[in-house]
Image (cartoon, coloured by chain):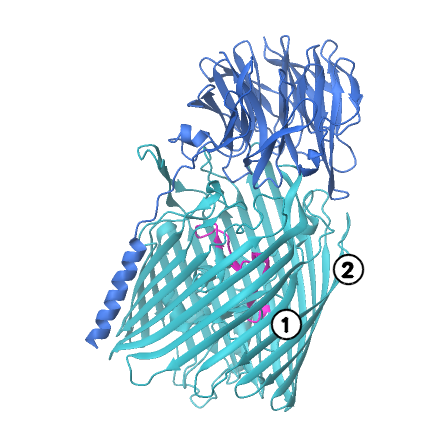
Chain colours: A blue, B cyan
Amino acid sequence: MIKQLRFIRTAAVLTVLGMAGCRNGDYIVPPVVTPVDTPVAHQKYKGFYLLNEGNMGSNKCTLDFFDFTTGVYKKNIYAEVNPNVVKELGDVGNDIKIYGSKLYAVINVSNKVEVLDAATARRIQQIDLQNCRYLAFANGKAYISSYAGPVVIDPRSPLGIVAEVDTATLQITRKVEVGYQPEEMAVIGNKLYVANSGGYRPPDYDSTISVIDLTTFKEIKKIHVDINLHRLKADSDGDLYVTSRGDYYSRPSALYVVDTKTDAVKNRFAVAASNLCIAGDTAYLYGSEYSYNTASWKINYAMVNVKTETLLSGNFITDGTERNIKMPYGIMVDPETKDIYVTDARDYVSPGTLYCFDKTGKKRWSVITGDIPAHFVFLPAKQ
Amino acid sequence: MRIPLLRSTLYAVLAGCPIVSVIAQQPSDSTRTKDLREVAVIAPRGGKEIAPGQQLKGAELQRLNAQSVADALRFFSGIQIKDYGGIGGLKTVDVRSMGTNHTGVFYDGIELGNAQNGVVDLGRFSLDNMEEITLYNGQKSSIFQPAKDYGSSGSIYLSTLKPRFAQGEKRHLRGTFKTGSFGLVNPSILWQEKISNRVAASFSGEWTNANGRYKFRYRKTDAHNPAAGYDTTAVRKNGDINAFRLEGSLHGVMDRGEWSSKIYFYDSERGLPGFMANNLFKHVDRQWDRNFFVQSSWRKDISPRYSLMLNGKYAYDYTHYLAPDTAYYTENCYYQQEVYLSAANQFTVTKWWNVGLSGDFQWNKLNADLKNFSYPQRFTTLVALATSVNFQRFSAQASLLNTNMNEQVKRNAASPFRQELTPAVFVSWQPFNKIPVTWRSFYKRIFRMPTFNDLYYTDIGNSNLKPEFTTQYNTGLTWNHTFHGKVLQEIGMETDVYYNEVTDKIVAVPGASQFRWTMMNLGFVKIKGIDVKARAAWQVLEELQVTTRATYTYQEARDYTDKSDSFYGHQIPYIPWHSGSLIIGGLYKAWDVNYSFVYTGERYNAKANIPENYALPWYTSDVSLAYARTVNKTRFRLTAQVNNLLNQYYDVVINYPMPGRNFKFILSVNI
């Protein structure tokens, strides 16, 4: 009997010890370093950052860096550089830009713009702004679009805003109401152009560009374009290339050209455009158009000559690699080398792929990125 | 006397009125009706179960002092609980890695449906009036059951307490009060009344209120520089809950048969505490639920060779969801209805051969105030033909289920007509008469229909979806032995190895943007696993009884969907390779002590098995001590419990932190 008791006691003690036994700590995940290319001689840029959105709720927004001088790709650098930031970079990165010596990353669901030292990615501070979306800069100011306007009578449809931030103090100085769910912006002259989507209000999408006078910081007019606007890029002639996402049912996605001298639409391309990058005289674009009617999507790649405003024939990927790209999500063209970078977000919940193509459209290299690789920014060589 | 009492009971139960006061005025009278026949359960005829399920019941279940059915299910092998944390948090069960939608949950014999999203929140089912919980892999291997019971990859049967009266007893009354961490206030009452010698009634009511607050901690350190890192503790907010449950039932016996009727009502409001991310530690979403159902069951051995069982149910479910975020204000209501009718027949051909034939009909309807909503209705007809042979040491069962499904919508496209034929075979054999070892095996192929959300959710659903299939192969051994007059009184072991495939798995895939998804039949998963269960009962001292129960599960569940994916062949999310549990319970005089331990090994929280998605193992120890005493025929029981004794902070689902050490006190009074 006593023997049995002793056995039980020993077993109990052992079990408790086993259970109390140390659980290894949760460690900061170090970057994955992959040499992908030989060092590239580059006049203007030292490299580029790639912001991975991370699927909503996963808190897996991450930052990658490609160094031209070494040809090395570093995946997930933020947490190692900034180990003390609670729960790392945050949830759903939405835009990234460099202005002066600072890098700004919009983290949409974390309701903040993360401000880093551009050269080191070391955190300076954050700017809190609910449901922030995109960035633009001019005259020492940052402009941040946000879905979250003040609560009005109908809480279902608050207008969006653009917040003005002083890049020296990193404080919000002014705010202006724009259209519904504002997205990308561009500054031309003394005017800020804001693409309004109305994406929270289907089927009552917004269809306008808000024009903001930067001196008074007031909306001076709206330019009617098409429903559900998203991208808005300026070319060197003062034209805006604006994309409409369509309604995912019968109204297709399209690309518009807005003349900022007249503030009127002057051209429309019947081409699905999800994202574009203008380098020199060419706009490189892709469309991943989903239709709920057929429960399928069509993916297309195209180029537009922004001088002649004509759709060029052919695809900028020429070696057939596009067949491996499940979901194109980010695009950037190096203005100096004309190398084309395209990201594949694949299924949105697992690591994506970054492809680098030369100017003839042949794949130079590819590398695994974070989840939903999306937004690029070049790091200038000299600051 | 008897009839008015029956009537008033019925009215009281149906109206859900406060019965306590009615009863309090009636002094208990145990001297009446001494010679009446006891209301008892008459077991259905037919063969024994070929593959007995895993079971927790009676005292063993009570000793766990678990808050909900989900907490008790953690002690079963081969399953994973997806727990979003806290008292009001969603808790679902994934049996053998096939996905939560493949688990059928039956409440007193009839399946709890949720055509909208296929999820039954087991956190909402209290253990307060639960008699037993049984988990069957494949299906309950009986042939005298409704066709629906053949229709899931794994089934959980929840059986509420049935009134059982000893000689001379007429009434049981039990009041329970639970309180503790999370601001929990949880009173409940159970009242059982013997109405006649053939009919008994039962009423159970419960109120759960908690602010749901608890501390959680996120901590990371730099492996190379221990000084760097973060360590933050915060309070989980917006996890409050206020819920009422009212349940009434009648149980009757007749010659060679029995019947029961049940009415169930649940009403709740809760905050949805949401995921925790950088700079985002609070959410404001709220949800209101109202669930109502009535169900009846009737069973009789009509002739020596023929038995009949009828079941019927009507259910109404209402969900109101509100996300009053200034930027994205969402408010939606969903209304679901279900009608279910079933007839099961059993023919006894010879002493050892039975044949069963069941036919079920089910109607589901979902209304919602979403824009461009489809308003779907589903008409399901199930017919199951089954046969079993039973000999002394060998039994076998085969069944074939035919399912026909028709859907109608008011808008958009309806899912096309589907017809599926799915088989199952169960075999059990005890090779040696003298050795109590039984070999059992099964094969089953079954599917789950896409849910209404999968098919029709505005801007997400895809009405072209096909059913998602599972194929299961299982083989195992059981060994049970009883010793007389020894310290070790009883020992039992079960081991199963299995291989499952999930094909045409319904997965969310990117739609137009990261905020718009759609559903596709894309996934293909292969699962290999081992389940081990062991239990023993010990009589250590004359008055010290000890029971032990342990489970261990090994699972390899790999994604073989697309060779071009970097995660091809990786373990699917949230499935640990190793998991297990241990319960040690002791009973000494009036004292009752219980220790329980749950272990979930390392796993990944996303498809790619990379360091960014790695999740640490977690393990919790719960200890409870209870003292029972009877004073003047009134039995008091006081329990104190510490959960997560070692205060481990962990996430079951990424960014949904679980509570650390927490306490509970329970007082129950039986009259």
Q: What amino acid type is highlighted by mark number 2?
A: Phe
Where is residue A339? Give x, y as percent: 64, 22
- Label 1: element kind: strand
Q: Is residue A273 left or right of residue B581?
A: right
State the image quarter where residue B164 is shown: bottom left
Tag of residue B624: none
Q: What amino acid type is highlighted by mark number 1?
A: Ala
Please identify, in this view, whether the residue under mark 2 or under mark 1 is nearer the observer. 1
Please report the bounds of the magenta region as a residue range: B82-110
Q: Nearer the viewer, residue B342 or A288?
A: A288
Tag of residue B417: 2
Q: Is residue B56 left or right of residue A163?
A: left
Residue B105 belongs to magenta span: yes
**Between discs 2 and 1, the one toward the N terminus:** 2
Residue density around tag 1, few if under 14, some if 14–19, many if 20 or more, within 10 Å? many
Task: Name the residue furthest front.
Answer: A38
Residue in the picture at 67% in, 65% down: B339
The residue singled out by tag 1 in the image is: B424
Residue B350 belongs to magenta span: no
Q: Nearer the viewer, residue B10 or A176?
A: A176
Where is residue A126? Give x, y as percent: 45, 24
